[in-house]
Amino acid sequence: PDDARLVAESVTVDPIGRIAADGSVTLSGTYRCTGGTGPVFVSSSVSQGDQSVRYGIGGTRAVCDGLEHRWVNTGTPDTVVLEPGAAHVEATLMELRPMGIVPLPSFHARQARDVTLTAS
């Protein structure tokens, strides 16, 4: 059915993220992708206040078998301490396609949403 193609690739962000005592941030969600020619990753970034300033939070290697999987990324922003409360998260499903010498990123899906960061 045509509907299956529309949801073949997606990424979601859970409404709650966590901040540990050491400042590390854990974000999570789900993804679904179909086979690519290169490795596929779920990357995520977070912003607080100014949405033009985003901090990358980890990356997870994706399993692209057409099924839904969970992703969890943990990282510590270098230059800022994030606070519990409202934040904005963007998750991207990205493939590194072999193109000549340098693999080029190819975006499969992305989602941005407002989340709440809670102290864990």
Image: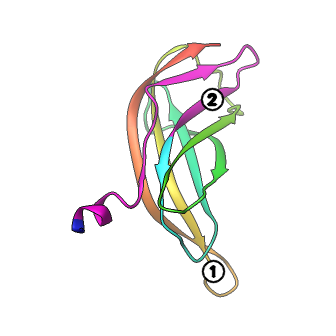
In the image, taking residue 22 as reference, residue 57 lies left or right, namely left
Q: Viewed as shown, does residue 34 lie left or right of 111?
A: right
Query: Is residue 16 highlighted in magenta?
Result: yes
* Label 1 sits on residue: 98
**Could you say where residue 30 lies in the image, as x and y percent from the top left?**
49, 42
- In depth, the one of 40 and 66 nearer the eye is 66
Image spot of residue 34 (x, y percent) = 48, 66
State the image quarter where residue 15 is shown.
top left
Q: Which mark is residue 26?
A: 2
Number of residues whose C-alpha sits closer than 10 Å to that of mark 2, classed few (under 14), some (14–19) or many (20 or more) = many
Q: Residue at x 68, y 34 (%)?
A: 74
The quadrant where residue 108 appears: bottom left
Q: CA distance from mark 1 to mark 2?
A: 30 Å
**Does 64 sit above or below residue 113?**
below
Range shown magenta: 3-29
Rendered view: 95 above or below 50 = below
